[in-house]
Amino acid sequence: MATATASMNNNKSVLWDWLTTVDHKKLAVLYLIAGTLFFVKAGVMALFMRIQLMSAENDFLTGQTFNEFITMHGTIMLFLAATPLIFAFMNFVIPLQIGARDVAFPFVNALGFWIFFFGGLLVSVSWFFGGAPDAGWTAYVPLSSGEYADLGLDFYVLGLQISGIGTLVSAINFIVTIINMRAPGMTMMRMPLFCWTGLVTSILIVFAFTPLAAGLALLMLDRIFGGQFFVPDSGGNAVLWQHIFWIFGHPEVYILVLPAFGIISEVIPAFSKKRLFGYTAMVFATLIIAFLSFMVWVHHMFTVGIGPITNSVFAIATMAIGIPTGIKIFNWLFTMWGGKLTFNTAMLCASSFVPTFVLGGVTGVMLAMVPIDYLYHDTYFVVAHFHYIVVGGIVLGLLAGTYYWYPKMFGHKLNEKLGILMFWLFYIGFHLTFFIQHILGLIGMPRRVFTYLDGQGMETMNLVSTIGAFLMGAGVVVLVINIVYSAFTSERVAVRDPWDARTLEWSTTTPVPEYNFAQTPQVRSLDPWFYEKIHGDGLMKSAEPMDEIHMPNGSILPFMIGLGLFIWGFGMIMLNMENPIMPPAIVIGVGFVVTFGSMLVRSIKEDHGYHIPLDKVKKIEKEVS
Amino acid sequence: MSDSVDVSKGLPSNPEKATLEGKNKFLGFWVFLGGETIMFATFFGTFLGLKEGTAAGPTADELFSLPLVFIMTMLLLTSSLTSVLAMFSMKKNNFKNMMILTAITVVLGLGFLGFEIYEFYEYLHHGLGYTTSAFASSFYTLVGLHGAHVVFGLSWFITLMIRYSRTGGITLTNAPKFYLASLYWHFIDVVWVFIFTVVYLMSIGGA
């Protein structure tokens, strides 16, 4: 895939360059590709499940395969598709939006990607070793214990453990980048909302992925080393897993949806030709949502029997999240109100996000009412609810972001006609698939069950849902066609700012040079680029004289650390295999040595990076402008 | 470039935070420790939830002996003190003192580790295997994870000491490295204070 970044190192082969890159723009492309592949994979699983549910007592899939598909669909979509796609945009956009040359730790950025990638690979190879995990993406014990679940669950536990480390180090990197690397004048309250939501999401990751890491470690110890954490006969407690999982699991929803909020908050002002309405309120609403997201995990466990007092407290906390979310909804509406609206694909996705998300929010408040939750629990009503949040919220946000930032990332726009076709196929398909599932849930169709009986009034609605799923699939196919078609036919974008937008990333030249900004910009206002277009001479003021630019060196070590963790994780799984082809201890040892050896090399070797000399910077600047 | 610092007149007073890279590492490491805190909190919660689940195996007050844990606590607290003193030496640009104090820290840490291995060995002989009960699993996991952190911290110190023993000076590149290792060591120490209280004192005191 063509990239817009000007490469400095022409003597390296293309493959080596991408394996060793620490450039945030190239890592964004890597995240985008990896996330898209996982997204397509999990999407195809969803289509298979919809085919199975198309008619009553269908035998397209066996119950076991269906269980593996629901588990992998959920796990991949949340951990390995949505997370990297969001990281792709955060990686590309945040340093540009705050006027930085790169993230705070370029090496750690690459490390995060490769660890995530190898973790995802480890989950994915489970198909070749006796079947995928089959206990649902929540992996409740005892269903996920050694007694009831096969090797697939070991891949789940170790793969997610490893990919979680990658996500965690990336999040730390983003926090430090946003706090320490802002250009002069870019105060916290002048940051674009995407940076704010990126910051808050990263903080949530630091505090939510660590309990997950602990929980997965407990499950791993139970499964592989005979721990007794979740075994009631030995004094263990099965509900403990549910608590730990949802202490992670609920913030996870906000980890994914807040950056989508951020994208929407960038796209809507850009195509309404107005500044974001209620910027300060938006920032504080984001912070409040983040805070409350840790206070509501028990609403996933209302039917466990924790007691009416606890349930009530968590129900009220859950409903309270509706308030800051409502603030956001109204601010987006008021941003559009009276604006000069342009309805291209990005804006269509962004604006249709608003009513779709409201529907998901309303069912969320319905589910928060404890007595009624007993009726909805584990039915398709819940499935419909969270797909309205996840697809209607996160995926529409990601699509908006794709169409919006594509020209900056790849140097050409995506075709608008195909884009609008994609939007309508996807949007109609989405509502067709999931709206009707509310009703299916209300008449009692349980989730996670691979078939249903004839004559219960569920056939027609399931067929409609399946048709909708295929429309969504067609939408994604059109998107893929669009990417290929546009790569060949679209005009190169030669201007800095094809959308006449507002934030700092549009002040860079297209393609963005390796060092982003030849001179660090001086920020004078919120929406700094728009401010200079109106009040200045249409170019950013510089905060420093043109000088040589310090750049970090590429390194293969992040790849090696990820590979080592993959080998280590595979060795751990081999401990549970009946006839491993070689002693697991050797594999574990090799992985251990590769990982820690690479870390040792990194620690011992002082790497000061290199400088791009001044005349070369001037030459590049002349070429791109 | 703004991140180059003039060292011709000697090191600045905070060499670990003088460069942008040092500042970034400083902040990033604090955030990392925040995450570690939450991870340990989860294991503490697990221990508190499962410590009554002894399933006919040995119980906490049958096993734990305060004198042993007291010695371990003293060793680790003292090592934290020497680590702080090492950082004071670093800020005064006294490389030799810093190396000596770091070496003392390592020796004290190794002493702690030895006692911990002895402790686990003893409990094993009293019939508390890893798989005996939920209490056993959660105890060994929490305290063992802390022990693993001690091992990592010691390896870190030793690596740095070997790497920089011949260079003979504090630079703006190695100061953040020593500082972060020291920060990590203090974190390990703080976690131990909580383990001492929550695991040992509360189990014996009957709270």
Image (tube, rainbow, N blue to C red):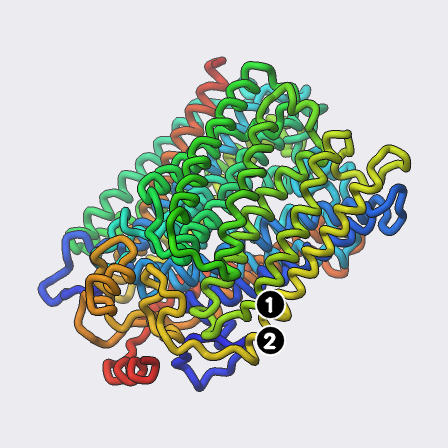
Could you tell me which quadrant the N terminus of chain A lies in? bottom right
Residue type for callout 2? Tyr
Q: Mark 1 points at which residue?
A: A418
Disc 2 chain ID: A
Q: Name the residue under label 2.
A: A485
Query: SS class of the residue under badge 1?
Result: helix
Q: Can residue A587 be seen in this view?
A: no
Residue at horizontal 28%, vertical 62%? A529
Residue at horizontal 86%, vertical 33%? A456
Given residues A578 and A16, the one toward you in this image is: A16
Q: How crowded is mark 1: few (under 14 residues within 10 Å), some or many (20 or more)?
A: some
Q: How crowded is mark 2: few (under 14 residues within 10 Å), some or many (20 or more)?
A: some
Could you tell me which quadrant the C terminus of chain A lies in? bottom left
Disc 1 chain ID: A
Contact flag, marks 1 and 2 (Cβ < 8 Å): yes
> Marks 1 and 2, how far apart in space?
9 Å
Q: Position of residue A288 (x, y in %)?
A: 40, 34
> Which image quadrant for residue B161?
bottom left
Q: Where is residue B79 in the image (x, y as percent from the top left)?
A: 32, 40
Given residues A21 and B136, the one toward you in this image is: A21
Residue at horizontal 27%, vertical 42%? B82
